[in-house]
Image (cartoon, grey):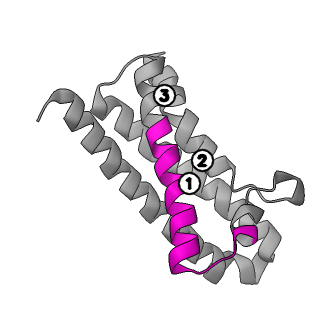
């Protein structure tokens, strides 16, 4: 396998880990946070926690990938974001049978829904990690 192929394979494996982080975060939000904080606060706390955990994983991925520079890291972030949105809408629609309205509702920042932070973290996280680790 070429170096580029290996990096893309590592990126996909890392993203699968992000799915696990998000699923675990969802379970913790529903079972632990919502009963104590209510749905709205649990959504915010759970989303921020998932973003922090994903960013921690990204901080491990970037040096392991040996990628440097904005564009290579941004391409990885774009892949992760595309996979995240495709998974969320595919899984939500096909497996969970959610309506399009329900799926888009979590992206309504003006209604207090902050899930948009997750795709933003997956997109900008690699570049941010590269900047942090290079300094």
Viewer-side residue, 128 vs 94: 94
Q: Nearer the viewer, mark 1 or mark 3?
A: 1
Q: Residues within 10 Å of mark 1 (few under 14, many from 20)?
A: few
Q: In this rendering, is residue 37 above or below 54?
A: below
| Lower sequence index among marks 1 and 3 | 3
**Residue at the disc numbered 3:** 74
Report how far apart the C-alphas of labels 3 and 2 lie in the structure. 13 Å
Q: Residue, x 51% and y 27% (percent of image)? A: 127
Secondary structure under the numbered disc 1 in the rendered image: helix
Query: Left of 134 or right of it: where is 36?
Result: right
Q: Which residues are magenta?
A: 78-101
Secondary structure under the numbered disc 3 in the rendered image: helix
Verify CB contact (< 8 Å) between mark 1 and mark 2.
Answer: yes
Residue 19 x %, y %: 45, 61
Q: Residue, x 23% and y 29% (percent of image)? A: 4
**Residue at the disc numbered 1:** 85
């Amino acid at each position: 396998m070429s170096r580029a192929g290996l990096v893309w394979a590592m990126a996909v494996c890392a993203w699968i880990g992000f799915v696990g982080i998000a699923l675990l975060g969802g379970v913790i939000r529903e079972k632990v946070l919502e009963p104590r904080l209510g749905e709205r606060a649990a959504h915010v706390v759970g989303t921020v926690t998932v973003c922090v955990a994903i960013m921690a994983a990204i901080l491990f991925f970037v040096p392991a990938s040996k990628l440097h520079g904005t564009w290579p890291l941004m391409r990885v972030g774009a892949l992760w974001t595309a996979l995240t949105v495709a998974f969320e809408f595919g899984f939500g629609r096909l497996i969970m049978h959610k309506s399009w309205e329900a799926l888009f509702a979590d992206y309504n920042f003006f209604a207090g829904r902050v899930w948009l932070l997750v795709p933003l973290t997956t997109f900008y996280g690699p570049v941010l990690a590269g900047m942090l680790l290079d300094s």
